[in-house]
Image (cartoon, helix red, strand yellow):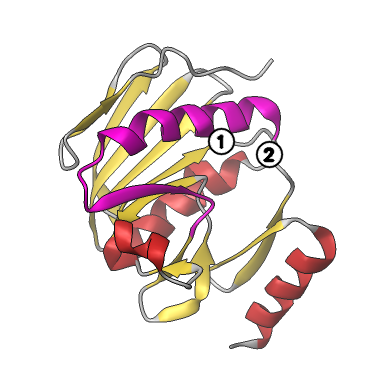
Amino acid sequence: MSRLRRAAEAAEEATGLRAEIIRGVLTLSPPRRGRHLRIINELFRQLDPALPDLLESFQNGSVSMPDDKDDYATPDLLVCDAGFGESGEWLVDPGDVELVCEVVSKGNSIKDTSEMVGWYADAGIPAYLLVDPRDGTWTLYTVPREGAYQGVLHGLYGEDVEFPALGVKISTSGFTQYA
C-alpha cells in the first residue's frame, strides 16, 4: 500500500469525509446532502430489482483503476458482479463493473462532469450515468475507448434512461433539483 493510500485511509478515519485517489491526487468529499442522497436512493430502488441475477447495485463501493489499486474512485452507486457482495474486499475490480452513477454535487461539479468522465473511461467502465440536479439533466456515457466515451446521450428529468446492455430502464421523473 502506498503512502498516499495510507494517507487517504487516515484522512477518512480522522474526518469522516469520503476519500478518493484520482490520478494520484487525494480528494476528500463532504457528506452528501438530502437531495443528493434522495436521487441515489431512487436510482438504487429502480436499478437493483431490475438487474439480471448475476449483477447487484452497491452504494459507495469503490472501484480501482486497472493495475493500480492505489488509484480509486467511489461513485455514488455502482452495478457490478453480485459476487462482490460476498467478498471481504472494498475495491471492485473495474472489469466486474457494468455501470457507475454519480450525482453532481453543488460544490464539486467539475470533478463529476469533467475529471470523472475520463477516469471512468480509462478504467474501462462500460457505462457512466451522470445526474445533474443543478439543471435537471442527465448524461449517459457509453462505449469507453482510449480514455474517452464514444457514446453520449443527454436527457432531461422526466425522460427515461435506458441501459440496453443491462436490459433496464429507469424513470427520472422523481429526481429532485437543487434549490
Residue 36 is situated, as x and y percent measured from the top left of the image, at 61, 31
Classed neighbour count for the residue bearing mark 1: other residues with Cα under 10 Å, few (<14), some (14–19), many (≥20): many
Residue at (63% x, 36% y) in the render: 105
> At numbered mark 1, what does the secondary structure look like: helix, strand or loop?
loop
User: Does residue 99 appear in this view?
Assistant: no
Residue 40 included in the magenta stretch of the image: yes
| Residue nearest the viewer, comparing 101 with 86 | 86
Q: In the displayed structure, would residue 166 be above or below residue 84?
A: above
Disc 1: which residue: 104
Question: Foreground: 170 or 7?
Answer: 170
Q: Is residue 154 left or right of residue 176?
A: left
Residue 111 in the image: x percent, y percent? 57, 48
Q: Is residue 57 magenta?
A: yes
Crowd class of label 2 (few under 14; some 14 to 19; many from 20; radius 10 Å): some
| Callout 1 touching callout 2 (CB < 8 Å) | no
Magenta span: 33-61
59 or 161: nearer the viewer: 59
The CA span between labels 1 and 2 is: 10 Å
Q: Is the residue 133 above or below the residue 27 in the image?
A: above
Q: Amino acid at mark 2?
A: Arg
- The mark found on residue 32 in the picture is 2
